[in-house]
Amino acid sequence: MTRSHSKAGGVEFRNVSRRYGNVTAVDNVSFRVEPGTLVTLLGPSGCGKTTTLRMIAGLESASSGTILIGENDVTLLPATDRDVTMVFQSYALFPHMSVIDNVAFGLDVSGVGRAEREAKAREGLAMVGLAGYEARLPSELSGGQQQRVAVARALVLEPEVLLFDEPLSNLDAKLRRRMRDDIRELQQKLRLTSVYVTHDQEEALAVSDQIIVMNKAVIAQQGAPADLYLRPASRFVADFMGASNLVDATVVGRDGGRASVRLGEATVELADASAGVDDVSIAIRPQAIAVTRLADAPALPVSVRKATYLGSHMEYLLDSSVGELFVVDPHMVATVRAGESAFARFDPTGMAVVPRAG
């Protein structure tokens, strides 16, 4: 199953909306997925990400706007006329069919001859690490193995675009980590244009070239994983892209793209993305706070409410003049106990200025 790199096509949405009566599920959304890349649609339930994926597949129709796959306008094309395959959350395997017959099913429907579809199915199973499982039934496989079969079934069709609809949500945490790595490795090896839907920010960070964060039917922010994590554009994105302490602060000075921000009794220098406003919020990652008995600047006086030893690190819950702070601190030499007074020191690389509203 040798893919032609030229077959991979991009996906583009131009001002696409999807309405159900008075309810707008997707509102004037525009983005582009470059050929051979994996883009994740990330967001909470009801944000519009699954509806967007289904519009790419042709399972939902756009109320307005234009959808392109490759250079072709597919807005009005039915799902059967789009060179797109989806890997579903539920696996959707036929329980009475063997593994190899499940993988070969789409090829059979497409009219591929028996010998060719069996060869392609075997190659697909080998690609996902399931060579030797051909004769088994889905009920004889683990959840992770069933998901691999579903991926193989999609791969053998050699689609122009491969879609993933929360493919790992039915797996336990250990299997999710392994499968997300396998999916990413396959996508990069085959240079598949892929669109991936999840509500799990860690999963999105692990598999994506680009992430599109959606909220309330619109795009809240899009960019490379590191950009969204380190430079969120809003309180919503900062909070959704992993654990974050969101505290109110005041800009007291600006110079050359940097801002001096007062955080209670402490002042820190940060990259300025505050759109010129002085009343801002600071998103502080738990790993960007160190707890110490020394008042090193910039330092914020705190009271330690909880101190939890977790082997490789300490977790602290702190009370401060700017509110409650959650801390993940790997410094285990001079730990601080619950009930003690201490100081919080900040690492600016784990902090971001965001507008106080939004």
Image: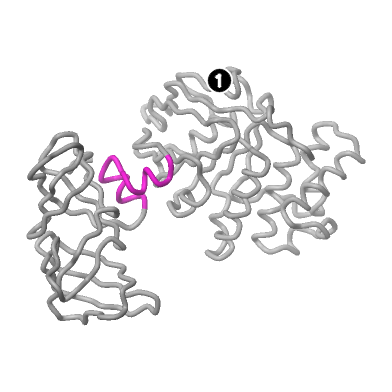
Q: What range of the chain is rendered magenta? A: 224-241
Residue 235 is inside the magenta segment: yes
Q: Nearer the viewer, residue 234 or 96?
A: 234
Q: Residue at x 30, y 78 (%)?
A: 308
Residue 350 vertical position relative to residue 319 in the rendered view, above or below: above
The percent coordinates of residue 153 (x first, y second) are: 73, 45
Q: Answer left or right for 56 relative to 292.
A: right
The residue identified by callout 1 is 75
Q: Quadrant of residue 162?
A: top right
Residue 152 vertical position relative to residue 255 in the rendered view, above or below: below
Q: Nearer the viewer, residue 121 or 337?
A: 337
Q: Main secondary structure of the magenta part?
A: helix
Q: Residue at x 43, y 38 (%)?
A: 212
Q: Quadrant of residue 54?
A: top right
Tell me the element at label 1: loop
Q: Quadrant of the C terminus?
A: top left
Q: Quadrant of the N terminus?
A: top right
Q: Amino acid at mark 1?
A: Thr
The percent coordinates of residue 269 (x first, y second) are: 17, 50
Q: Nearer the viewer, residue 5 or 166?
A: 5
